[in-house]
Amino acid sequence: MSEKQMSREQRRKAMEQQKKKGKKKKTSGGGWFKRIILAILIVGVIGLVFGIGLFTYYASSAPELDEELLRDPISPTFLAADGETEIPYMTGEDREYVNYEDIPKLMEDAILATEDNRFYEHPGIDIIRLGGAVIANVTDGFGSEGASTITQQVIKNSFLKNEKTIKRKAQEAYLAYQLEQEYTKEEIFEMYFNKILMSGNTYGFGTASENFFGKHVSELELHEAAMLAGMPQSPNGYNPFNNPERAEERRNVVLRLMEQHGKITTEEKEAAQAIPVTETLLPEEQRPAPPSGEYTAFMEMVENEIEALDEDIALDEGLTIYTTLEPNVQKAVNETMASNIFFNDEVESALTVVDTETGAIRAVGAAREYSGDVRRNYATERGRQIGSTIKPLIDYGPAIEYLNWSTGKTLVDEPYSYEDGDQEVRNFDGNFLGEMTMREALYRSRNIPAIKTLNEVGTKNAKEFTQKLGLDFGNIYEAAAIGATDEYINTVELAGAYAAFGNKGIYTKPHTVTKIVFRDGTTEQVVAPDSVPAMKDSTAYMVTDMLRDVLNPNISGASGTTAAVNGIDIAGKTGTTNYSTADLEKYGLDNSSAPDIWFAGYSPEYSISVWSGYPSNERAMDTASNERLLSQQIFKDVMSKISSPEAGRFQQPESVVEATIEVGTEPLQLASDFTPSDQKSTELFVRGTVPEKVSEEFVQEDLDAPGGLNASVVGSNVDLTWNYGDVEDVQFEVAVEADGNRSVLTTTDDKSYTYEALEEGRAYTFSVTAVKGDQRSDPASVIVEVTPPEEPEEPEETPPADEEEPPEDEAPPEDEAPPEDDAPPEGEGNGEGEGDGETPPADGGDGEGDGETPPEDGSGDGENSNGEANGASVPPADGNGNNGNGNNGNGNGNGNNEDEDSEE
């Protein structure tokens, strides 16, 4: 029993122990959770302590509040490209200061609804707005959204450098709180109201009210106050004088915010939105003079560029702006724009000068006279098509880049209609020139080859190529090949795109600012855009080499020769736009009228694009006169003034090779030795794409020589006849040679010819050669000898018996052998002279006789030529002389036939 009871007790204890273990496990799990919470709290406390400590550290290094800096704007400093020359532009001295009590409630409501609706509730920092900004920064990255109150903006624009760092934000928050402690809300609002940059050199809402509406701020209407309240976000972008549409859109946003925050009713909002923003603006003649001077247009571009960089960068922060301006280049541009190069007072022009290598804008010609408040910067406007200056960008550049076309690619200029309709495409001269190289199509600016090229390239490739050059032409259709695009570009963008061709295919977006140094003098923000490869260096150089020919005065048909500058390596392209038929009728213009004349060109130093035309299309440029050359003349005048002798030349890269092709071959073939010179052209190829096949177009089998040439002598005439096979376009050149002088008698289609001037005692060699183009056959020849009448022979005298040895020239006595080396073997002569061939020898050696009198006996072996026809001669007498071809001697045989048995 006891064992059983013991067993039960043991079981009970065991069960209790298991329960305790279970409790321990539960207790252990709850302990871990508590530990995690505790750890989080500890980390949080540490983080808070650290954050407070860091904030305290940053705050301790914040600058002290300075009332003068708080109330007065700090104008920026602008430096030229050399980093030292200061550019005089914009100050904040002229300002309409408005005290808080004079600021109308309407104006204050508009500003607060737009910038800081809880301004009167927060202590300098808006916690609610800050929370939203924190979330945005976590999701989109630090600095993606700010939470600046009006108080913080006053601090930032007065003391702190512009950088998105925790340190700056901590100092800004600390100083904003300090500012709220030392100044009332009304005083802080007054600082902001009078300090903020509104546009150009206009600071403060009071000054803006006077400048834009000609009234004190207290007199502003709702729609006017709303427009001004929206301007600080983009002072120049929302300037109603220059950008009324953007200003009106921004004004309407402010009106909606005022309604949202209960400042105005819906009816008031709608009534104000219905008023055009331009309705109550000051008329032009009453507006204050804007900033002026030789750098005005350039500096306005600087302002716009800074605004586009970062909305937190404001020009009233005392910044130092490093620009790309070259004052000497701007001076040259201004001189040209003010010169008598223009043919009347109404025509306008604009240009942009860009550094070919860096893309930096060196100067701008906005207009002939860029002054007054309502003025147009034609250099930056995008209201004009660019004509044929588009062809390297959208047609031929992509063809080389994507299709590896050679500059000698065969294109055909022929009647052509757009693929999507029946509209016929015309060239500017109304003619079609047939087959030509891509090079010629470009320098002659032919339209049909350009359109065909775009069709081969494809609109997708063309769009990609132009986008890499910073250009947007919208949707690309066939007509875009010759400049008819949906979207337009300006002189700045065109000069920048062409610069990439001159910079080995590297593109840098045109820009006016390189870096910004903030008020403390230590922090720099580099803002110059990065350079990026836009095309292969082979494409860039091949386009450049073709565009060189556009300016080459030695090339017939080159369209841009007026723009050439002696000693400067320049490539460029002309451009002319056209009126539609409807516009020609509407404005009463003829077919020689053009709304726009362009020229874009570049050297290794500078890229310049020029536009010329009239402010309104109602008046046209006359392309039938020298008016069409205006843009080229302006380009040349500026380029010649600013270029240096050390500019150098464009260098051919290793990726490009030259080869001589036969023009018109498709696919391209190399020229042969028989290719006519006017069909040869040395062109450029992407390495590895040079054709291997040699053209056989002009290679033919050798011409056969005429056959059966015969000469028939009748008196002083000789009739020549010959025969020839059935070969087309063959002519025959007949020539004669006598006494070493040769002359061509005629070239004839016949197979006969009569020569009528034979002279006695002379030998004539007549030859006939077949001729076809550049080909010539071997000549066929015949010798004609004219002999004088024979005279009776005189009897030979026998010397007296007592006469001593015969003269030296006579034959030796019969019993006396001739000396060795002098006398030939018996019965043979030893001469190899050149007789006249009129009378062959009978028997004798190869002596140097005159051949006139034949020997009677002997076995001479006179040498004779191989004339092909029947020479006229006297037959031999008696003997076994070998006279070659019988009576066909030509003067090279029949030598001195001295014979031992000459006497009978």
Image (spheres, grey):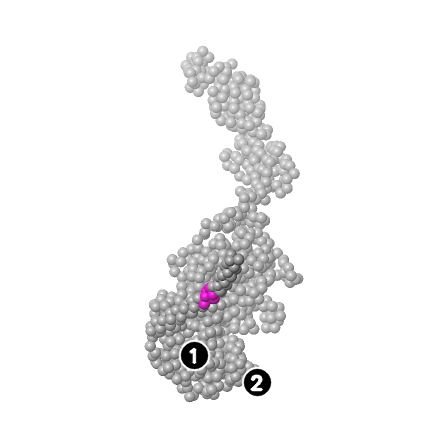
Q: Residue 211 at what x, y percent from top left?
A: 45, 82
Residue at the image position 55 percent from the left and 28 percent from the top: 866
Instruction: Please state which amino acid type lies under the numbered disc 1.
Output: Ile
Q: Residue 219 at what x, y percent from top left?
A: 47, 88
Residue at the image position 44 percent from the left and 86 percent from the top: 103
Disc 2 from disc 1: Cα separation: 28 Å
User: How many numbered badges does the structure rendering display?
Assistant: 2
Q: Mark 2 against mark 1, which lies toward the viewer?
A: 1
Q: Which is more toward the observer, 235 or 837? A: 235
Looking at the picture, does residue 436 appear above or below residue 511?
above
Residue farthest toward the top in the current orientation of the protein: 815
Residue receiving disc 2: 267
Q: Residue 783 at what x, y percent from top left?
A: 56, 31
Q: Which is more toward the observer, 853 or 192? A: 192
- Secondary structure type for disc 1: helix
- Secondary structure type for disc 2: helix
Q: Residue 65 at what x, y percent from top left?
A: 34, 78
Location of residue 84 by image quarter:
bottom left
**Res 21 visible:** yes
